[in-house]
Image: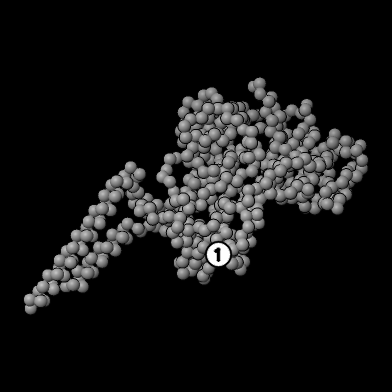
Amino acid sequence: MKRHVTRIVLAAVMAGAGAAQAQPVISAPIALQGPGPYHRLTLPLSIYSRTAYEDLRDLRVRNAAGHAVPYAWLGNEAAMPRTASQAVPFFALPGSATGAATGDPVLAFSVRPDGSLALSGGKAAAERAANDAAEWLIDVSQVKGSLLQARFEIAPEARGLFAFRLEASDDLRRWRPVGGEEQLVRLAHGGQTIERLAVDLGSLRTRFLRLRWTDPQHGAPITKTEIDSVQAVEPVAPLEWSAALRPERCAADYCDYLLPRGLPVQSLRIDLADINTLAQVGVSGLIDAAPASSATAAPHVSRNPLYALRHQQRRTVLPTGPGEVPLLDTVVYRLAQAGGEARSPVLALDGAVYSRLRLRTSGPVSVLGATPPTMAVGAAPRALVFLAQGGAPFSLAWNAAPDTAGTVQGAAPGAPLALATLIPGYAADKPVVADGASVTLPVAAVEAAVAAAALVPVPAPEDLSRQWWLWGALGVGLLLLAGMAWSLFASLRKDRAAE
């Protein structure tokens, strides 16, 4: 009888604890590259929409035994990137020339001891080539760090749309494409002069660039080329782009766009639906009010040097409302020209996390066209480094639903550490030495777990009092069970004493 009652009490306690703490957990296998012991893992952007917490506080790296291994976020503690701008040499290549390496008869180059190019053939040859330039060779061999963007100046009288493609090379013989077709733009429209004379280079590393006009008969005379570069301790992952985002709602003078949850937005592309549209707009970030998260959770650190370069002197022209973070003011356009369509360039943002972006117009929102534009946002994936402690295989694990008990804290086992704690002798001005690793997120399993988690209602902040009453009722019930068990045990002892 005594054992039976004890089992009932234990079962009730375990059931109550399990109901309060059980959360669906998802894991994905990690493939290691190299012996380690440290490995660098870049997270796919799609993980933000699959985890329970936007700041990824519940992310864990586990070994074959299921034990959490130490890891740290990369980039948060590294020295801030250093940006620089400098004019670089550039040379006109006439006709169908492919450069000095192929024996161009008009222009010939020699390489100086420092690796830069020297022009042979005299000033007269260079002037003749500039008048018939189908291509331009840009020497960036003396630029330190990664190339952020190229900025051009063209002849003052040049007007129009000048389409081109960029290629990169380290030896002037083998060339690789850099992005797709780009445009230099200088137009007069509606009393405004529109200029677009810069092109993003996406943190490229190379020694030489070659600009090739799509239509060599209608190229622009280039008078100056400047390169903006950045020297960063940790390498920057290439941007990944979202699908086209349609406005969630539009008011009289703005449209709001819901962003993928937790995504640190670094670039923005605005696609106007109607041709021959031009409007001045302001872009703001909106942040939802939410309870403060754990103080030890890894915060996002804004490290977008291109945004800083372009908006150091930014002034907010358009008014903003409460809860808005003004990011930039610009002119968006889509114009038909003889050489094709002129479209707004990609915009650099600060890399922070917003719930929505607001596109605000200086007049009625209809100036954007009969159909509101779509947006696409780009972000660089976050990366972490972990210690391959214990046996392989390793896996990435996270919660598929929030913990209603609030037990996920920064100090929980397996939470991220500081890099200086994870790697003895770590220096913020030196890159982390680690082998590679990759992760493949599951599809069917994740969707099934998230769907199952969605069936369990999560209490809203205003329902927290009801949640505490439920916990209180559970505690009172457990106390009553314990009291009944104690009373029963006492009765059994009295009966045995009477016998």
Residue that mark 1 sits on: 387
Residue 273 sits in quarter:
top right
Q: In which quarter of the image is the C terminus?
A: bottom left
**Residue 50 appears in view:** no
Question: In the displayed structure, would residue 76 be above or below residue 462?
Answer: below
What amino acid type is highlighted by mark number 1? Leu
Q: What element carries label 1?
A: strand
> Could you say where residue 106 lies in the image, as x and y percent from the top left?
89, 42
In this view, the residue in front, 153 or 1, is 1
> Which residue is pictured at 78% across the width and 26% down the height?
157
Q: In this view, does 33 lie above or below 165?
A: below
| Residue located 83% across and 40% down the image | 92
> x, y percentage for residue 279?
59, 27
In this view, which residue lies farthest toward the top? Answer: 191
Whole-percent x, y for residue 185 in the image = 70, 32
Residue appearing at x 41%, y 55% in the figure = 408
